[in-house]
């Protein structure tokens, strides 16, 4: 049992805090973000089971072919569990971060070396107007956010985006990229579309826009000083 899991179990019945307090922005002091291997599989599964992501399981960029044709839900669940190595704090690798608010599992962000996302390699969006080594594992990528309904609209994706920076840098990344959507005030957008994040989320974390390959998508990048 990790230190975080033990703290969560002390928070309330069945190891949970009573639930989200209020509906305002989440204060940083109420937030704990851990590498996925330091979280429990039950916690991560709870985050995915309560969202549109329950079917994809963050495998959109992991499956070389068409995700709905070439994999089953059971396979995608197993893939995510293997990639994250949940419940194994000693695991040498993991694939994302899990956010807790007052001990309650609240959100997830996928982050790994860019080549780990095989679908990105031949996707137009990351490479339009660019000429660089697509297999450079010194460049990491943030590809997906999942936030439980009770925590949406409260700034959690902003906090998760910031957490990816130290996570990648501490593991040897030279740069960190994201491929978010451009949103406009008054124009409705679904949570399913926003799984890649919104441009302003990464702007506030210090990323800079390097290309604008489509009207709705941009490539954001943060280069780390050696």
Image (cartoon, grey):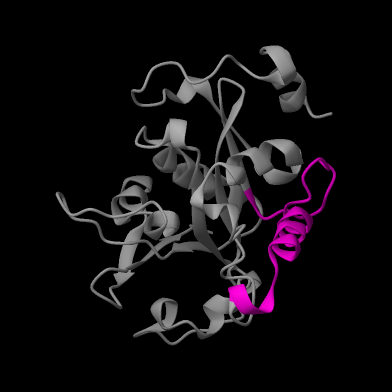
Whether the magenta-drawn stretch holds residue 219 is answered as no
Relative vertical location of residue 25 with respect to residue 133 in this rendering, above or below: above
Q: Quadrant of the image for the N terminus?
A: top right
The residue sitting at 79% across, 57% down in the picture is: 82
Relative vertical location of residue 182 with respect to residue 51 in this rendering, above or below: below
The residue sitting at 85% across, 44% down in the picture is: 90
List x then y, in percent, for residue 223: 45, 61
Front-most of residues 150 and 88: 150
- Res. 127 image quadrant: bottom left
List x then y, in percent, for residue 165: 51, 49
Q: How many marks?
A: 0
Whether the magenta-drawn stretch holds residue 94 is answered as yes
- Name the side, left or right, on which 215 lies relative to 40: left
- Residue segment shown in magenta: 67-96
* Residue 199 shows up from this direction: yes
List x then y, in percent, for residue 54: 59, 52
Q: Quadrant of the image for the C terminus?
A: bottom right
* Residue 35 shows up from this direction: no
Front-most of residues 38 and 196: 196
Front-most of residues 198 and 138: 198
- Name the side, left or right, on which 99 lies relative to 220: right
Relative vertical location of residue 176 with respect to residue 105 in this rendering, above or below: below
List x then y, in percent, for residue 64: 64, 80
The residue sitting at 64% across, 58% down in the picture is: 172
- Name the side, left or right, on which 180 lies relative to 5: left
């Amino acid at each position: 049992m990790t230190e975080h899991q033990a703290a969560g179990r002390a928070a309330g019945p069945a190891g949970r805090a009573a639930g989200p307090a209020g509906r305002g922005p989440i204060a940083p002091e109420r937030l704990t973000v851990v590498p996925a291997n330091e979280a429990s599989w039950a916690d991560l599964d709870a985050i995915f089971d309560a969202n549109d992501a329950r079917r994809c399981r963050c495998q959109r960029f992991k499956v070389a072919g068409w995700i709905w044709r070439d994999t089953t839900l059971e396979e995608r669940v197993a893939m995510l569990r293997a990639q994250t190595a949940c419940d194994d704090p000693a695991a040498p690798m993991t694939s994302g971060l899990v956010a807790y608010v007052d001990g309650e599992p609240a959100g997830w962000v996928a982050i790994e070396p860019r080549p780990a996302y095989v679908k990105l390699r031949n996707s137009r969006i990351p490479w339009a107007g660019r000429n660089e080594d697509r297999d450079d594992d010194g460049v990491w990528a943030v590809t997906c956010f999942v936030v439980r309904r009770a925590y949406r609209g409260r700034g959690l994706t902003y906090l998760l985006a910031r957490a990816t920076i130290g996570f990648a840098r501490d593991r040897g990344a030279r740069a960190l990229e994201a491929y978010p959507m451009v949103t406009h005030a008054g124009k409705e957008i679904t949570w399913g579309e926003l799984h890649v994040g919104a441009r302003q989320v990464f702007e506030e974390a210090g990323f800079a826009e390097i290309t604008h390959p489509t009207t709705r998508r941009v490539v954001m990048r943060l280069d780390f000083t050696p």
